[in-house]
Amino acid sequence: MDKQIKIHENDNVAVMLSGELNGHKVALRDIKKGENIIKYGFPIGHATEDIKKGEHVHTHNVKTNLSGILEYKYEPNLKEKTEGKKAEFMGFVRKDGSVGIRNEIWIVNTVGCINRTAERLARLANEKFAGKTDGIFTFVHPFGCSQLGDDQDTTQRILSGLVKHPNAAGVLVLGLGCENNNIPLFKTVLGDVDPERVKFMSTQEVEDEIEEGLKLIGELVDYAQQFKRTPCDISKLVVGLKCGGSDGFSGIAANPLVGAFSDLLIQSGGSTILTEVPEMFGAETLLMNRCINEEVFDKTVELINDFKEYFMRYNQVVYENPSPGNKKGGITTLEDKSLGCVQKGGTENVVDVIKIGEHVKTQGLNLLNGPGNDIVAVTNLTASGCHLILFTTGRGTPVGAPVPTIKVASNSNLANRKPHWIDFNAGPFVEGENLAPKLFDYVLKVASGEQTNNEKNNYREISIFKDGVTL
């Protein structure tokens, strides 16, 4: 007989662990038309027809219960503070007191017109200065000019967050000269920077941008070599939480495992950031009731409703989710997806809500504004100072952020098929194996220098969120 799991005692569906419906749901009893489908102990939609015990429960007979803007009431369900174990990693302490887990040189271009120049500089610099740092990298994008209002502001905040990221020992800000986001303007966004750590070059203002760029990168390499790995308290570590290419096992394996890790890290003094706002829809009250006070609750309500209004402003259905790949993997409605997704945030209290490009100010679980799109989300997490990202996946994806991106497979089949994508297998978690301490130890190894697959394969990219007019 095919194996199945009932996640919560109140559920009227189970998830199949083998067979043709692997990862999909089946009814545990007869379910009448209009009756709620219960998974994770919460409704994930309602039956659109009578469903017999043992029948497949999916998009052909289930519809979401969700609608548009809602009103919320603060009903706190807070967790008592728990002290975790003391731990350290080997990081790089910067002059401003921040800590990085890599000693890299980053080329941050203010505008897309110089993408190829940035890539050429990175290639030549890696050849010229090989072995002197953890590498020289650039993250190309098409923006920085012909943008207005909030779009330009978002681009500047993302790029500013990258320039200030502690994994970069040194940064070359590369401009063209005539763009909207020109270097003099961008400097006003950046504020004060260490001139030894951050160099600027406008390519229109130098005779040979490659020669001058390599000269400046050489100075940054010399500066970076003063930093050595030293023991750093885990309280300095900030980890991003992300999922992509989810399947029916994501919500019962990889995501709750990452949630257990998040709890361990926070209890030890570290911080995590949960993003993907549209994938909180339907599970948002679970987060709202964990907000440490009414101020954070109000910010969370604003976070949710503002993103719903963004959908509605473009006449888009708020709940046009999950994706085709999610559905193929067994996820039926947005509630189904969201209740699985928010498990990455564990059970600790929500301490703050931060904006795109804003770094963590309060230790603990933070919520970050932004969409669920994989590359946009990992960019936002990086720009908010995450040292590394835990990225769960059931379908698989090679995408990587500018920072180490630990791919956590929700099933052993994916981990075995794609060992060059996957860093950690959460499959045995379904069988009850306690993998959280093992993942905790692995994260410390990555923070101390062990490379992830995205680093080994140089899968590093960014995508900047856009919502407005391009001239």
Image (spheres, helix red, strand yellow):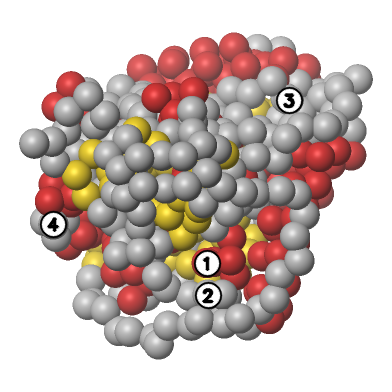
Q: Residue at x 33, y 84 (%)?
A: 82
Please identify the quadrant where the C terminus is shown: top right
Mark 1 and 2 residues: CB-CB less than 8 Å, in contact? yes
Q: Residues within 10 Å of mark 3 (few under 14, many from 20)?
A: many
Report the residue marked by disc 3.
143
Report the residue marked by disc 1.
286
Indicate left or right for 157 with 433 as reference.
Answer: right
How many angstroms separate mark 3 from mark 1 (CA)?
Answer: 36 Å
Give the residue furthest to the bottom.
Answer: 80
Mark 4 and 3 residues: CB-CB less than 8 Å, in contact? no
Disc on the earlier residue, 4 or 3: 3
- Measured from the top left, where is residue 3 in percent x and y? 14, 41
Q: Residues within 10 Å of mark 2 (few under 14, many from 20)?
A: many
Disc on the earlier residue, 4 or 1: 1
How many angstroms separate mark 4 from mark 2 (CA)?
Answer: 26 Å
Report the residue marked by disc 2.
290
Local SS, label 4: loop
- Relative to residue 87, is residue 143 depicted above or below? above
Q: Residue at x 36, y 29 (%)?
A: 329
Report the residue marked by disc 4.
432
How many angstroms separate mark 1 from mark 2 (CA)?
Answer: 7 Å
Disc on the earlier residue, 4 or 2: 2
- Where on the picture, by quarter, is residue 10? bottom left
Kind of residue sitting beneath label 1: Leu
Local SS, label 3: loop
Mark 3 and 1 residues: CB-CB less than 8 Å, in contact? no
Q: Is residue 198 visible?
A: no
Local SS, label 1: helix
How many angstroms separate mark 4 from mark 1 (CA)?
Answer: 24 Å
Give the residue furthest to the left.
Answer: 1
Disc on the earlier residue, 3 or 1: 3
